[in-house]
C-alpha cells in the first residue's frame, strides 16, 4: 500500500506543554484509522499538522504528490444566509447537478437544497460540510470529532459513508461504537508518541490490557530478583572472601530496571456521591405543550416517569430535545398543560453551554466545593476532579484560564457533586474523551436517582438508559421498546431513504461472492445481532404469556375480586403481545433471508 502521509521525528510543544516528542507514523491510501487518547494529548493537533494548519517545531510531515486530502472543518465554511446548493457550488466549484447528486448521499434533497444553512439543525449543517468535503474528490480524509452534536440518523449516514469510502481516513472520536463500526486500525496519541495498531478499538484495548498485565508481572519478577540480590549483598559484602561476588551482584542489581507501566484507558473510575433510592412518580406530564412564543415545538405530552429511571431523550436534531429538557428544568416556560415533579424534589441541569456562566474569579476546587452537597467530603471532591482530568495542582487553576471544554467538565463535575435526586443532562459527553465517557456511563448506571439525558453516543446510551422518550414530529412520547430496537428502527429508516441502495435494501449483488469483505463482515454482524434480538423477543413474549396466564388464573380463583390493577395490566399485555409477535416475525424473516444469502 502506497504511503500518502508520513510524520517523522515530529516535535510540537506549546510553552512547557510537550504534545509530540519524536513522534513517527505513516498512513496509506486504504488506511481507516480511529484516533484515541486522553483530552489534551494532541489528537486535534495531529490533525492540524497533517492539514497544514500547524507546523511542527522539529521533524517532518511529508505528503505524497498522489494525496488528495480533504477534512471536516470544525469552523463553518459557510455563512448562515447561504442556501445549501449555492454554497456547495461556490465552495467546491462543481456544477449544481453534481453537488445535488453528492448531497443526496447525505439525504440533502429537494427543498433542503434551497434552505438557508443557518435555518438547518446542527446535524444537517454537518451533512452540508460532509458533502463539501466529498465533492473535492479526496482519497484521504481527516475528521476531528465528527460525531459531536450529531443525531443518530446523521451518525448512521456518516458511518455508512465511511464504511463504503474507497480511500483512507483518520477519525478522532470519543464514540467507541462509531470507531468500532468504521475503523480497521487504531492510533493512540499518548506521552508524545503516536502508536498505530493493526486492529480495531476493541482489539487494541484488549491488547493493551494484556501488555500492561505482562509489564506488571515482569516488574514483580524484577523486584523479587532485586530483593534476592540485595539479601546476598547484605550477607556477604563484609567478608573478604565473598566481597567481589557481592560487588558483582550489586552491579547486576543496577542493571535490573523496571518497565514504566502505562495506565490503560479503560481504568478511569468515577465515583458519584450516593443518593438514596426511593419509590413513586418523579415526573408527570399532562397535556403539556412546549416551545417558544412564536413556535410550538410539541403538544399533548402525556406520560409518567417513575423515580430511579434513567431516561434517554432521543430524536433527530431540531425536533425539540433540548426544548423539552429546558422546559422540565424550569428554564423555559411551558406553552400549555402542565408538568409536575415529585414532592420537594430538586433538579440539577447541565446545558450544552452552561459553562459560559461560571464565575471566572473562582478556581476549579473552590467552584466544586461551592457546588458540592454539604455532606460531600473534600477527598470525594478531589477524586471526582481527578476523574475529570483536574488532578494535582490543576484543581487550583482559575476558571478564567480554562478552555471551553475544561469549563464544561468543571460544570458537569459540580452538578454530579450536588447530590440532587434528579439530573437533567444535555449532551454531557461532548467534551470528554471516550474512556471518561464510559467511566461516567458506568457511574450513572449505578446512580439511584433519576436522570433525563440527551446523548447521541450509543455506547453511553446503552450503558445508562433504562427508558426512552422520543421527540419526533411535534410529539414527545415514551418509546415502547429498548434502545437496541430504537437504533434498529432508525437504521431501517435510513436504509429505506438511501439513494444508493437497491430496492431490496442491499448494496451490490445479493450473492456472497459479489460482496466485499466489509459487506460480508457487516452481514455477519447483522445476523448475530438479529439472533440476539429474536431470542430477546421470544423471551419477552414467553414472559408476557406467563404473566397473562397468572392474571387469568387469579380471576378464575377469585371471581368476585375486581383487581383493577390486574385488569389494567391484562389490557397492556393483550396490546403488547401481538406487537412483539409481529416484530418477532419480521426479524425472523430478515434473519432467515440473510442466513440463506450467506449460504449461497
Image: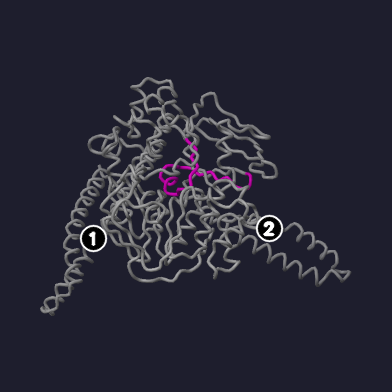
Residue at image position (75%, 61%) is 253
Q: Nearer the viewer, residue 236 or 109?
A: 109
Q: Quadrant of residue 97?
A: top left
Q: Quadrant of residue 387?
A: bottom right
x then y, percent, for residue 130: 42, 33
Picture layout, residue 335 above or below residue 82: below
Residue at image position (61%, 32%) is 61
Which SS class for mark 1?
helix
Looking at the picture, the colour scheme in use is one colour
Span highlighted in magenta in the image: 169-192
Considering the image in quadrants, where does the C terminus appear? top left
Indicate which disc, 1 or 2, sits on the residue closer to the N terminus: 2
Q: CA distance from mark 1 to mark 2?
A: 54 Å
Q: Which residue is mark 2?
A: 258
Disc nearest the viewer among 1 and 2: 1
x then y, percent, for residue 586: 20, 50
Q: Image check: 77 left or right of 541?
A: right
Picture layout, residue 448 above or below residue 502: below
Q: Nearer the viewer, residue 453 or 600?
A: 453
Q: Image check: 260 left or right of 151?
A: right
Q: Which residue is mark 1?
A: 538
x then y, percent, for residue 350: 46, 54
Amino acid at each position: 500500500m502506497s504511503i500518502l502521509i508520513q510524520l517523522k521525528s515530529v516535535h510540537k510543544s506549546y510553552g512547557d506543554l510537550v504534545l509530540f516528542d519524536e513522534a513517527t507514523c505513516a498512513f496509506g491510501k486504504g488506511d481507516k484509522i480511529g484516533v484515541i487518547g486522553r483530552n489534551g494529548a494532541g489528537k486535534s493537533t495531529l490533525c492540524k499538522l497533517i492539514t497544514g494548519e500547524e507546523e511542527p517545531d522539529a521533524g517532518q510531515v511529508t505528503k505524497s504528490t498522489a494525496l488528495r486530502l480533504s477534512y471536516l472543518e470544525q469552523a463553518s465554511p459557510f455563512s448562515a444566509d447561504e442556501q445549501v446548493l449555492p454554497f456547495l457550488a461556490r465552495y467546491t466549484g462543481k456544477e449544481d447537478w453534481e453537488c445535488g447528486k453528492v448531497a443526496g448521499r447525505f439525504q440533502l434533497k429537494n427543498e433542503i437544497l434551497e434552505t438557508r444553512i443557518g435555518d438547518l439543525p446542527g446535524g444537517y449543517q454537518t451533512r452540508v460540510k460532509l458533502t463539501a468535503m466529498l465533492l473535492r474528490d479526496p482519497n484521504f480524509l481527516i475528521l476531528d470529532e465528527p460525531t459531536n452534536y450529531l443525531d443518530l440518523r446523521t451518525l448512521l449516514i456518516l458511518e455508512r459513508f465511511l464504511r463504503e469510502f474507497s480511500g483512507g481516513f483518520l477519525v478522532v472520536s470519543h464514540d467507541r461504537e462509531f470507531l468500532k463500526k468504521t475503523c480497521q486500525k487504531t492510533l493512540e496519541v499518548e506521552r508524545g508518541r503516536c502508536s498505530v495498531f493493526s486492529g480495531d478499538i476493541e482489539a487494541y484495548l484488549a491488547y493493551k490490557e494484556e501488555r500492561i498485565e505482562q509489564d506488571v508481572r515482569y516488574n514483580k519478577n524484577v523486584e523479587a530478583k532485586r530483593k534476592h540480590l540485595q539479601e546476598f549483598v547484605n550477607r556477604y559484602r563484609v567478608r573478604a572472601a565473598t566481597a567481589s561476588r557481592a560487588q558483582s551482584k550489586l552491579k547486576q542489581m543496577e542493571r535490573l530496571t523496571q518497565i514504566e507501566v502505562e495506565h490503560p484507558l479503560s481504568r478511569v473510575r468515577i465515583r458519584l456521591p450516593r443518593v438514596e433510592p426511593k419509590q413513586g412518580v418523579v415526573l408527570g406530564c399532562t397535556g403539556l405543550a412546549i416551545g417558544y412564543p412564536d413556535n410550538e415545538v410539541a403538544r399533548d405530552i402525556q406520560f409518567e416517569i417513575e423515580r430511579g429511571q434513567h431516561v434517554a431523550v432521543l430524536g433527530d436534531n431540531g425536533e425539540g430535545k433540548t426544548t423539552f429538557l429546558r422546559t422540565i428544568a424550569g428554564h423555559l416556560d411551558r406553552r400549555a398543560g402542565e408538568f409536575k415533579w415529585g414532592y420537594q424534589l430538586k433538579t440539577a441541569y447541565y446545558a450544552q453551554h452552561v459553562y459560559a456562566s461560571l464565575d471566572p474569579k473562582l478556581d476549579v476546587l473552590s467552584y466544586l466545593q461551592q457546588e458540592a452537597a454539604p455532606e460531600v467530603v473534600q477527598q470525594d471532591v478531589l477524586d471526582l476532579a481527578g476523574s475529570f482530568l483536574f488532578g494535582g495542582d490543576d484543581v487550583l487553576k482559575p476558571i478564567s484560564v480554562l478552555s471551553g471544554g475544561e469549563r464544561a467538565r468543571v460544570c458537569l463535575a459540580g452538578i454530579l457533586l450536588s447530590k440532587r435526586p434528579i439530573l437533567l443532562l444535555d449532551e454531557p459527553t461532548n467534551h470528554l474523551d471516550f474512556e471518561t465517557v464510559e467511566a461516567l456511563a458506568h457511574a450513572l448506571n449505578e446512580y439511584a436517582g433519576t436522570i433525563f439525558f440527551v446523548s447521541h453516543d450509543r455506547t453511553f446510551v446503552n450503558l445508562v438508559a433504562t427508558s426512552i422518550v422520543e421527540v419526533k414530529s411535534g410529539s414527545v412520547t415514551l418509546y415502547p421498546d429498548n434502545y437496541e430496537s430504537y437504533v434498529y428502527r432508525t437504521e431501517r429508516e435510513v436504509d429505506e431513504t438511501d439513494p444508493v441502495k437497491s430496492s431490496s435494501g442491499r448494496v451490490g449483488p445479493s450473492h456472497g461472492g459479489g460482496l466485499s469483505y466489509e459487506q460480508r463482515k457487516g452481514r455477519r454482524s447483522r445476523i448475530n445481532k438479529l439472533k440476539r434480538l429474536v431470542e430477546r423477543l421470544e423471551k419477552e413474549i414467553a414472559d408476557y404469556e406467563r404473566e397473562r396466564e397468572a392474571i387469568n388464573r387469579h380471576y378464575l380463583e377469585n371471581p368476585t375480586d375486581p383487581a383493577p390493577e390486574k385488569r389494567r395490566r391484562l389490557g397492556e399485555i393483550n396490546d403488547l403481545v401481538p406487537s412483539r409477535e409481529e416484530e418477532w416475525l419480521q426479524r425472523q424473516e430478515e434473519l432467515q433471508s440473510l442466513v440463506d444469502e450467506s449460504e449461497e
